[in-house]
Amino acid sequence: MKIHEYQAKELFRKYNVPVPDGNVAFSVDEAKTSAAKLGGFPVVVKAQIHAGGRGKGGGVKLASSMEEVDSLANEILGMTLVTHQTGPEGKLVKKLLIEAGQKIEKELYLSLLVDRATASIVIMASRDGGMDIEEVAAKTPERIIKVYVDPLMGIQGYQLRQVGFGLKIPPAAMKQFSGLLSNLYQFFIANDCSMVEINPLILTSDDKVLALDAKVDFDSNALYRHKDLMGLRDLDEEDPLEVEASKYNLNYINLDGNVGNIVNGAGLAMATMDIIKNAGATPANFMDVGGGASSEQVENAFRIILADDKVKTLLVNIFGGILRCDIFARGVVDAARKTGINIPVVVRMEGTNVDEGKKILNDAGLNLTSAVDLSDAAQKIAAAVN
Amino acid sequence: MSIFINKDTKVLVQGITGNEGSFHTRQCIAYGTNIVAGVTPGKGGQKMDDVPVFNTVRQAVEETGATASLIFVPPPFGADAIMEAADTGVDLIVTITEGIPILDMVKVKNFLVTKSCRLIGPNCPGIITPDECKIGIMPGNIHKKGSIGVISRSGTLTYEVVDQLTKLGMGQSTCIGIGGDPVNGTNFIDVLEAFQNDDETTGIVMVGEIGGSAEEEAAIYIKENLTKPVVGFIAGLTAPPGRRMGHAGAIISGSSGTGAAKIAAFKDNGIHVCENLGQIGRICKEVF
């Protein structure tokens, strides 16, 4: 679960990870009040959306007077910000972070994430702050410092020094930097983060170290033990159909194509999207109803996909294991009765109780095309699309 | 021969009295698996059908001589259950549970370094040696005894592959789902090595998906160490970057973990690539 920069910075403050003074604002008036509280100029007006690349998209600007705060807040609030991460449709800006400007001496990069291969927490740091770190890693990997922390031991003093000296932190700021990194690690562990990224981390001309940006992603599987963090979820940042699907524990992702699909199991669902593509069409979604879906979940999966106007045809691919085909078929029949299915639907069903499932679908007299196997399903989808 | 399990494997089930635990225990027994014990803290002394239930894994192992554990406990207790099993010295732990926090698994994985057991999963369908032993939730009837080894990060996708193999007359030596989580126990390379050393296995099907770099590492291992033919498939070529595709580990981060990179690694290292799932049985028939 992602959160906004202003929320991440509020959490950082609690863990004594230094950040600039600042406040969130939901209106132009609030932006001006926040700026006044900071007691001086320049201040930075920052759009708060989950996607990165806000600066380049025109969502982060410097104001050197209250008049500028007024005009910039007016400009950015309500704008549709397009960045490389939002997609071409962009994202509506509904809140701002108003922050004290800083005297930046040097921009650095610092992040913590879980490393799959070593099952440890990896600290990544670089003197090339403020840049796209992927690009730095690809072109100049020697400019990235990586330190792996044993999760059973926690972060050690020598590791803090390894990162600090690697970043060439000046002696006057070293103690403060070590504190920041140590506290950031505690924050990461205590809140079940999957990623924390500060880009840039800045050195000021008076030898202070501050997190100028803050990106935090929490492990959704661990949120059950962090009830306080759940309140930070911002449904405005999520697709409404995806929010609806999450209520029924359906793994659903809305995509650009026009062939809807309903599948059980994540791997098979991904492979089914690929099959649609191979057939010359494009998938409208990813939908995994899960290994052991109930007929109610199946019914809701149909309802959610059919609510999506761009879906022109639907491929259903079920390999019954735990999810029995008869249970699935009942969900399909219920969905057809309640919402009506008015687009071509190709059903491919295999596995546990498949004959019973097929009988239920046949007896219901629904207008479905059945496919005998995946190749057949792909051909029938291609025919339906063209 | 087969790998990791056979007809002599004695299995205990952690979380045997829960809905999923009891349902799948019955399915395993019906398949012929030798389930010797169950564990549910606080329900020691009871029975699940004819299976004795114990309070702790240690008691269950001491009383029954179980050598493998199958875990169905809810995700908040998953890490603890794995460590409890590992601490008793069982050889194999198969964890079906989906949704264990990643930092819990990071700790477990480091805890296991000092233990002698093998962990399969979590978030996996388990392992089956057809006609001998099934420790997992896969439908047993689609499998057929034979000489193809199957390894996958997925559940139903593996069933699809196995079903096509069986229908074309290619039986399986052992099928293993290593799970869809980013941090898991047994990895592709562990299983590839075991299949290479298994006399009964003559060919291998490897089913990967987007996220991480396990497939790329496995591809290099295959080129350097395997003499048996491998057919590879990758799911998620059409997945958008930055989104988790159902499995916690199936996510493209920036430019890493893409399906295209994995397919390229397969091709570079002599693996027979299947690009269309509907054709995987036919391609295996040609290659094997």
Image (cartoon, coloured by chain):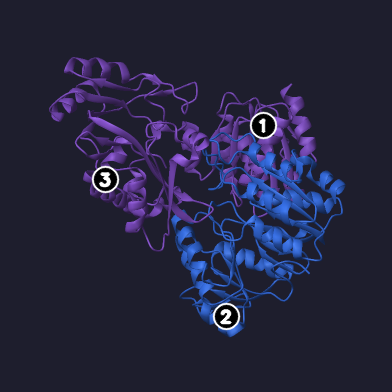
Chain colours: A purple, B blue
Amino acid at pointer 3? Val
Occupied quadrant, residue A238: top left
Question: On the image, which quarter does residue A74 sit in?
Answer: top left
Q: Would you say residue A141 is visible in this rendering?
A: yes
Of circles 2 and 1, which is in front? 2
Q: Chain of mark 2?
A: B
Label 3, label 1: how far apart the Cα atoms are: 50 Å
Circle 2: element type: helix
User: Is A99 located above or below residue B27 in the figure?
Assistant: above
Say the numbered circle drawn on residue A100.
Answer: none
Q: Quadrant of the N terminus of chain A?
A: top left
Q: Position of residue A261 (x, y in %)?
A: 64, 35
* Relative to B60, residue A53 above or below: above
Badge nearest the viewer, 3 or 1 = 3
> What is the number of the mark on residue A17?
3
Q: Nearer the viewer, residue A152 or A223?
A: A152
Label 3 packing within 10 angstroms: few (<14), some (14-19), many (20+): many
Same subunit under labels 2 and 1? no
- Chain ID at mark 3: A
Q: Nearer the viewer, residue A261 or A364?
A: A261
Q: Residues within 10 Å of mark 2 (few under 14, many from 20)?
A: many
The amino acid type, in three-letter code, at marker 1 is Leu
User: Is A141 placed above or below A187 here?
Assistant: above
The percent position of residue B142, horizontal first and vertical second, equals: 77, 56
Q: Which residue, given by chain and number where applicable, does mark 2 sit on? A: B61
Q: Which residue is mark 1?
A: A314
Label 3 sits on a secondary structure element that is loop
